[in-house]
Image (spheres, grey):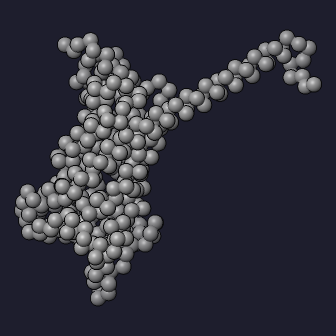
Amino acid sequence: MPSASSSSRSSLPVLAKGEQPWMHGAAGVLGGSAAMMLFYPLDFLRTRMHTLHQGSRTMPLRSAGEIVRQEGLRGMYKGIGVSVVSHSLGWGLYLLTFRSAQQHVTELLGDRLSNSVLEASGRDFLSACIAATITGTVITPLHVLKTRRQLFDGQRMVNGKPAQPLPSGLGGVRAIVQREGWTAMFRGLGPQIVLTSNTTIQVTIYEWFRRNCFTNHEDPSPLQVALASAFSKAVACCVFNPLEVVRTRLQDQRNHGSREYASMWVGLQTIWRSEGLLGMYRGLPVNVARVIPSTVMAFVLYEKCLWAIRTTSQVARSSLQGTSCSNTGGVADNNGGTSAEPQFQ
């Protein structure tokens, strides 16, 4: 039976007073975009390392040096535009749908939802799964564009001519669709949805810390947010790295039409057969070095932006209510006179 303290903590409302789900989405977009822009070179390097050939043991720093020598410093920032859009949109949409799902699940279950920590975590996990499915489906086309840009090799020959980079913006979508059809924009959808479950595990663990360990639930300290987000992301990252590798391979244009990468399951079997455990965990050190600081930054900014948005909204609402009350009072005073309209001197 849960103690009184654990019951009171787990019975915290899904949304704080004055909060709306869109506030979490907006805060997530701001935090996610800033984190991606700052740590993008590591994201680029991780994607490149996912496609290293069997037996390759190239170290991350050597890979980065080779990219800079061959493609220049700008090469480390290929695809940054679509990456920032996909990451910030995905992070914001995930938090929006997660908080909305939390709210609806709580309202749906009503009195049947007890105050136990287990049931609260179950509600968070169910809400996170709903958010993962919606977000994974929406951002998969953006991830395809991002992966194609990051893996572009100008030295590769196509029909005897040097490969051409994807056009920017919607031109890139048109180019892929014309060559490979609409289904190409959703290659890797299965791993993407499951990978968004990476965030499901992360957010479920983070929410447990938020309910049970944070001293101030509405405005937690940066240190508390940093420790909780770093631990939750490290666990999720280690569990889901093989799916990140197979998603990258599925979205790589060089594997289009290959029977070895016909699906997520076939791709995993191919990697395991040809490269073993090392292949399944390619890029893990770079990924951990990227996701821990970027996730900490995204969560700290998310919490601070959420606090700022919530405070601004409350101030604006109070001002509107004050204006409404003064207008109502003015009308009441005028009703006592000979005319219902305000009198101007």
Residue 135 spot, x, y in % from top left: 36, 47
Quadrant (top left/top right/bottom left/bottom right) for the N terminus: top left
Q: Residue at x 32, y 61 (%)?
A: 41
Q: Is residue 277 above or below residue 334?
A: below
Q: Nearer the viewer, residue 77 or 257?
A: 77
Seen at 36% across and 45% down, the residue is 298
- Which residue is at the front of the view, 209 or 10? 209
Q: Nearer the viewer, residue 242 or 136?
A: 242
Picture quadrant where residue 269 is located: bottom left
Q: Position of residue 252 (x, y in %)?
A: 26, 67
In the picture, measured across the screen, residue 320 lies left or right of residue 165, that is right
Residue drawn 42% across the image and 56% down it: 85
Residue 213 in view: yes
Name above or below for residue 163 compared with residue 86.
Answer: below
Question: Position of 304 compared to 286: left or right?
Answer: right
Q: Residue at x 32, y 87 (%)?
A: 161
